[in-house]
Image (cartoon, helix red, strand yellow):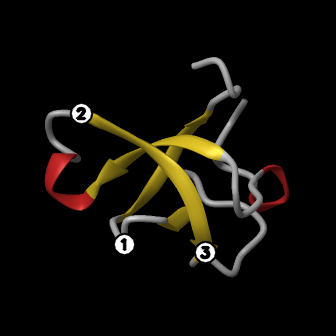
Amino acid sequence: MDGQQRSNIRPGMRVAIILKQNQRTGERTIGVVKDILTSSAHHSRGIKVRLDDGRIGRVQEILSEEQ
C-alpha cells in the first residue's frame, strides 16, 4: 500500500520508511508507527512518521504483518 496518503497510515502499523540520511541510497528501515508527523492529507515523497524506536522518516510502503 502507498505511503503518500495520510488516511492509509495508523499508529501500530508496520511500515518501510526512508530516513533522511538514506534518501540518496534509498535504503529502507522497517518499524512500527508511533506518531504521524505530517499534517497534510497527501505528500508526494511520503507521509513523515516517528517509529516506536524514535527514528523519523517518510513512509515508502505499508507492510502486512507477515512482511
Label 2 – label 1 distance at C-alpha = 18 Å
Q: Quadrant of the C terminus?
A: top right
The tag on residue 27 is 2
Of labels 2 and 3, earlier in sequence is 2
Judged left or right of residue 23, residue 5 is right
The tag on residue 54 is 1
Residue 45 visible (yes or no): no
Judged left or right of residue 39, residue 45 is left
The residue indicated by pointer 3 is 35
**Disc 3 packing (10 Å; few <14; some 14–19; many ≥20):** some
Label 3 – label 1 distance at C-alpha = 9 Å
Of labels 3 and 1, earlier in sequence is 3
Looking at the picture, which amino acid does disc 3 mark? Asp
Judged left or right of residue 65, residue 28 is left
Residue 59 position, x and y percent, is 52, 49
Label 2 – label 3 distance at C-alpha = 21 Å
Q: Are marks 3 and 1 in contact (CB under 8 Å)?
A: no
